[in-house]
Amino acid sequence: MTQHQLGPVETPEPPILRFERYLHAQGKRMTSQRRTIVDEVFSHHDHFDAEDLMEHLKEKMNLREVSRPTVYRTLSELVDAGLLRRMVLNDRYVYEHEYGYPEHDHLYCQHCRQLFEFHSDILDGIREEVARAHDFTATSHRMIIMGVCAKCRNLAGDGKP
C-alpha cells in the first residue's frame, strides 16, 4: 500500500525493547518469529495489511510459507502494546506505526487505495472547540477522509471523481 509520510520519528527506546517489556508483562516471551515480524514492521514506515506483511516476510526470508496465525497474533499484540495503530479500510485492517509517531490524519483514495498522511492545526483547533462545547477533554482523534486523488481523477479524463 503506497502512502505519503510525515517524516522520520525518534522514540525513547527501540520498538523491539518496548515490545519485549510488553510481552514480559503479559507472561509471554519474545520468539524468533515475533522478533522477525517486529524487525520487518519497523524497518520502514508505511501502511500495510497482514497480507502485505506476509509477502514482505516471504521475500525477505526466502520462505515458502509464513505462519499466518503468528503474523495475525503478533500484529494484535503490537496494537495492544501501543506500537501499531489499526484502521479499517475497505473491510480490511490496515496498520501503521503508533509509537512515537505524531498525531495525524489521512486522505484515502477509494480508487487506487493510496493513503496520504497530513496534519492540520485547523482540525486540532476544531477538535478542541468541540470538546470545550461539550465539556469534554480530548486526548486524540482519528480522521480518514475518503475520496479520489488527483492522479485517479486525471486518469478518468474529466478531473472529477
Image: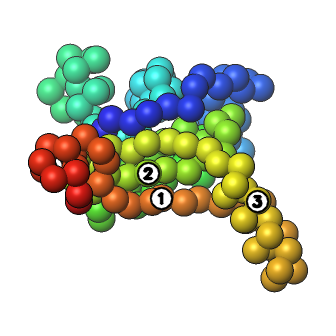
Residue to which mark 1 is pinned: 144
Q: What is the secondary structure assignment of the residue under circle 2?
A: strand
The image shows residue 116, relative to residue 140, as above or below, that is above
**Left or right: 128, with 59 as reference point:** right
Residue 55 vs residue 26, the one in the foreground: 55
Amino acid marked by disc 1: Ile
Whether residues under marks 2 and 1 lie with C-beta atoms below 8 angstroms apart, the answer is yes
Distance CA(mark 3)–CA(mark 1): 17 Å
Are there few (<14), some (14-19), or many (20+) residues within 10 Å of tag 1?
some
Whether residues under marks 3 and 1 lie with C-beta atoms below 8 angstroms apart, the answer is no
Q: Earlier in the sequence, mark 3 or mark 2?
A: 2
> How many labels sit on residues?
3
Q: What is the secondary structure assignment of the residue under circle 1?
A: strand
**Would you identify the image quadrant in which residue 98 lies?**
top right
Distance CA(mark 2)–CA(mark 1): 6 Å
State the image coordinates of residue 54 (x, y, percent, origin top left): 27, 35
Q: Earlier in the sequence, mark 2 or mark 1?
A: 2
Whether residues under marks 3 and 2 lie with C-beta atoms below 8 angstroms apart, the answer is no
Quadrant in which the C terminus is drawn: bottom left
Are there few (<14), some (14-19), or many (20+) residues within 10 Å of tag 3?
few
Q: Earlier in the sequence, mark 3 or mark 1?
A: 3
Residue to which mark 3 is pinned: 125
State the image coordinates of residue 95 (x, y, percent, origin top left): 44, 46
Q: What coloring was used for the rendering? A: rainbow
Residue to which mark 2 is pinned: 107
Quadrant in which the N terminus is drawn: top left
Amino acid marked by disc 2: Leu
Judged from this view, the residue extending furthest toward the front is 158
Are there few (<14), some (14-19), or many (20+) residues within 10 Å of tag 2?
many
State the image coordinates of residue 50 (x, y, percent, origin top left): 32, 44
